[in-house]
Image: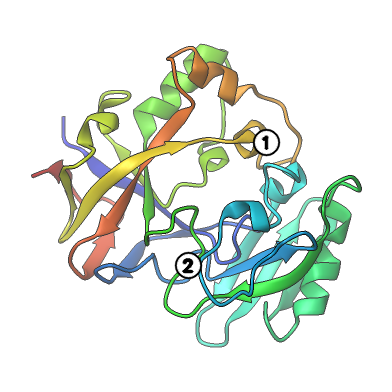
Amino acid sequence: MTTTLAHIWRYPVKAHGQEPLDEVSLEAGRTMPWDRTWAIAHEGARIDGKEWAKCANFSRGAKAPQLMAVRCQLDEATEALTLTHPKLETVTLHPERDEAQLVEWVRPLMPEDRAQSERVVRVDGRGMTDTPFPSISIANVATHRAVEGKLDTELSMNRWRANLWLDGLEAWSEFDWIGKTLRIGEVEFSIEERITRCLATTANPDTGERDADTLGALKTWGHQDFGIYGVVKNSGVIRNGDKAQII
């Protein structure tokens, strides 16, 4: 069976909205353009905002499940971001220049017993991914189907917030790729490690409500992992429908 790139997603503000793409131009050793370009630090963060920081410093779906239902659309030329949520009015703003407006917009989505959103962070040269290295997350459609089967329910793939989705593989076969090179279209990726998942995946990305024990399902396979992290080895463009293979 031929393996292909089925979906491309980016997340301009970490944990605050997702956007589909038909193609993306990647640079060697860099995160995906406009992916996690901004992040919202909460009031308990102890960071200067000038370099990469751990996800615990930011408002995110693991602590505020309603954030999982945010959708977005980015105008790259102006950096204007349109945000939608089923419980909020649609807003268009610039994440940095309109920082106060963005923080106020997400306030109703934050649980009262959690550290509240406070300020927007942007680090030059890379997105605020969950890894200290410039990663791009890659997931397997068949593995997602296996989790659905374990829970006996249909799940949105958006729960996993992966950048790239591959179709035409055996479930869990991606875990055998650690240390190997994956080629998608004209771009090669060094596969670095598995992705350990958190409570964010238990929330429905349409409603923001926690409604599926994804972590419990994963643990039946003896781990809490879903997807893999890759690093871009050479610059190039990838498109939906491109062939993918380990080389």
**What is the count of numbered marks?**
2
Question: What residue appears at the point 63 percent right and 63 percent down from the top-left corner?
Answer: 72
In the image, what residue type sits under mark 1? Asn
Residue behind mark 2:
127
Q: Is residue 175 left or right of residue 32?
A: left
| Residue occupying the far front of the picture | 46
Measured as percent of width and height from the top left, residue 245 is found at 15, 42
Q: Indicate the quadrant containing the N terminus: top left, top right, bottom left or bottom right.
A: top left
Query: What is the crowding at mark 1: few (fewer than 14 residues within 10 Å), some, or many (at least 20)?
Result: many
144 or 230, which lies in front? 230
Measured as percent of width and height from the top left, residue 6 is found at 34, 45
Q: Is residue 19 left or right of residue 133?
A: right
Q: Secondary structure at mark 2?
A: loop
The answer to which image quadrant residue 46 occupies is bottom right
Question: What residue appears at the point 21 percent right and 38 percent down from the top-left corner?
Answer: 3
Measured as percent of width and height from the top left, residue 59 is found at 71, 56
Q: Secondary structure at mark 1?
A: loop
In the image, what residue type sits under mark 2? Gly
6 or 189, which lies in front? 189
Which badge, 2 or 1, is on the more N-terminal residue? 2
Question: What residue appears at the point 47 percent right and 67 percent down from the top-left corner?
Answer: 127
| Residue occupying the far left of the picture | 247
Question: What residue appears at the point 80 percent right and 61 percent down from the top-left corner?
Answer: 106
Residue behind mark 1:
204
Q: Are marks 2 and 1 in contact (CB under 8 Å)?
A: no
Measured as percent of width and height from the top left, residue 130 is found at 50, 53
Q: Is residue 122 left or right of residue 134?
A: right
Nearer the camera: disc 2 or disc 1: 2
With respect to residue 243, does 239 lie above or below? below
Q: Is residue 170 left or right of residue 112?
A: left
